[in-house]
Amino acid sequence: PASIGIFDRAGLLVTELQVPFVREDTVTNIPNECLVIPGNVCVNTTTYVTTVTLPFKEGGYQIVYQRCCRNETLQNIVEPLETGATYNIWLTEAAMLKQNSSPVFQEWPPIFICVDEPLNFDHSAIDSDGDSLVYKLVMPLQGGTFAESMPQPPNPPPYDEVVLIDPTYSVDNFLGFGDPLAISPDEGQMTVTPGIFGQFVVGVAVEEYDRQTGELLSVSRRDFQ
């Protein structure tokens, strides 16, 4: 089971959920003529599903999952094998009062992209409530450690960001060389022309605003390699 921690605004643990495993899938790359390494390239995914009912709480809740570790071959962060990951979302007061649904990303990010070739990837999300969505690049968050690979329950907020290797890499230039990675704030279109071979971690967030009042309802984060 996956350990999901639910924390209040002060960072105190409200409850821990042991979420059952539901299914396993394989996300396979679309063939690309620039891929010259032998064998198949794929990502294995697992899905966990549960339902929890929470009372209204001033300040809302933060829902958190943590794991360690990131791939040792990542070259844009310091000590990647010792750098875990935190995946979280704020359940805001406004979202609870509105009985809001968070936006859902439509596609998996590409497993690999080709050096010196432009990428145009639709990283947009769909919101069933029709709220306004704004996209941005963000720093991935640290989580578990090599010694504590799957914290149960997850560690409380706040969470440190990963440490990028400065000055080559930054939130505005996750890949270091070539045309920098960018995402359009209104449409979620991701573009880049990478300039070197390597493996890199990237962070993306979508902010959801009430279509009538403009109030922030949620921030959904995703990071990937």
Image (cartoon, grey):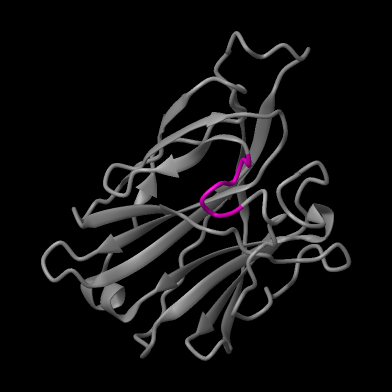
Residue 79: quarter of image: bottom right
Q: Main secondary structure of the magenta part?
A: loop
Q: Is residue 69 magenta?
A: no
Give the residue furthest to the top: 33
Quarter of the image with the N terminus in it: bottom right
**Percent position (x, y) of residue 158?**
59, 79
- Which residue is found at the position 68% from the left and 29% from the top? 196
- Which residue is found at the position 61% from the left and 40% from the top? 175
- Relative vertical location of residue 184 with respect to residue 203 in this rendering, above or below: above
Q: Nearer the viewer, residue 94 or 209?
A: 209
**Percent position (x, y) of residue 204?**
48, 51
Q: Nearer the viewer, residue 102 or 37?
A: 37
Q: Is residue 175 magenta?
A: yes
Residue 200: quarter of image: top right
**Percent position (x, y) of residue 41?**
69, 23
Magenta range is 170-176
Q: Is residue 158 visible?
A: yes
- Relative vertical location of residue 225 with respect to residue 214 in this rendering, above or below: above
